[in-house]
Amino acid sequence: MKNSLIKLKRDLISVYFSLHFLKFYFKKQYASCLNVIARIELLESNISDWVSGLFFQLLKNKYRPSDIISSNDPFVKSVRNRFTKENQLKFLCGNIIVLKSYISEKEKGVILLNYTEIINAFPFLFDLNKIQQRYHIVLEPSWESPYQMYYKLYQDSSFVIVESLSAREIKMDKKHNFIDVPVCAGDWIDESRIFRDDKAEIKYDFCAIANFKPFKRHDFLFDSLSKYWKGDLKYALMASAHVGHNKDWAEQMIKKYNVPGSADIFIDVPVEQVNRVLNQSKCHVLCSLREGANRANFESLYTGTPVVVHKNHIGFPNFRFDKTMVHNFTNAENFVGAIKNCAAPDKAGIAAKARKMIGSNAATIILNETIKKASLEKYGVWTKDIFRKVNIVHFYYFDPNDCRSCIDDYEYINGAALDKGYYDSAYAIERLSKSAVS
């Protein structure tokens, strides 16, 4: 009943947003139209998928690429106002990374854009034609949707490579002549910090690395355990002190639901302890239904610890992993059953598989080979591979010295900014020259 009422409320919000879409559509304010579609699709109401799909089709072939950059569009105005603020300017500069320097017209450089909001804002802040004259663009979205705004923003004057999160997204990539690559934000683990520890003693039935926020669904976790767990239970919860509720909240929720067994609750621990707890756990659980490519799941797999995640999770690429690595659930009872199925994981075998699929080294090889293959087919030239990066919330070069090889490229990006207030190459170089562990 509660879920039905929530979806009904979201249906009404979808209708409200639909009126805004129509207003922008008839005013030919297409960037705002795309933004509204994205907001409707994220609602996950009874009608949101149907409505967002219909509106996306309405926009098909309705305008030239240049039309969407109109400075009179409310969405364009909000983007430009936002990224002139100091903290947002730094956020932008820190999430554009050069993976390969420009060499020639036939061997373009490679730029990677992190976070969906950066990807969508980039064409409104930079001369995209100028950028694509010299660089192929890799998009690393932070959330999954078959109706991404950027499908209407990036053109095929250079390769557009998308780190796709789902089969339905890959289908849309192909429709727009984008190249999809089977990696995502969660893949770029720093292997020097997360690794398999064969000597670790297993002490937890599961661990959950998730901030105490509603969409992480700790209430589902605790309620499921209270109803269906039988026998001894020992588990670990890990969260940030700066995002969501605090440790006291978690302890109160455990008491409220009368969860069996005992929990170790870790707040703001260093990555070394994250690695230790993952190695000490039989599995890692993710209770959310939608988010980005949850990094903790990938870190867990890299340590050889299987993960438990919803069968229809939007954002985690279930389709990439076999049943020894990822255990799925659809309701509270089989959620607990999935945890029980991880009682004796083949950690060595899972870690061996993960090393071929996950980690900054594997992700770099996969992305490099994808771009190299396309470049050789089109231009017949490839003399230099891409640089390796790692994701520690934001990204860094695996070797900070690589940034110094790209000074001219960051200066070129600076010169392609539509306004000098949109980018600061000096800050970007300083930020990206740092080590991920500093």
Image: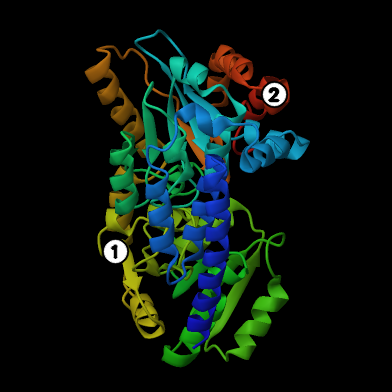
Q: Quadrant of residue 321?
A: bottom left
Residue type beneath disc 1: Asp
Q: Is residue 207 visible?
A: yes
Residue type beneath disc 2: Asp
Percent from the top left, x then y, of residue 15?
Answer: 53, 66
Q: Nearer the viewer, residue 239 or 34?
A: 34
Q: Nearer the viewer, residue 149 or 343?
A: 149
- Residue that badge 2 annotates: 424
Q: Name the residue rendered at 37%, 37% in the picture.
A: 61
Q: Name the residue rendered at 34%, 76% in the picture.
A: 338
Tell whether 165 sits left or right of 96.
left
- Residue that badge 1 annotates: 346
- Category of crowding for the residue at label 2, using alpha-carbon neighbours closer than 10 angstroms: few (below 14), some (14–19), many (at least 20): many
Q: Quadrant of residue 336?
A: bottom left
**Quadrant location, the C terminus:** top right
Q: Nearer the viewer, residue 94 or 257?
A: 94
Above or below 225: residue 362: above
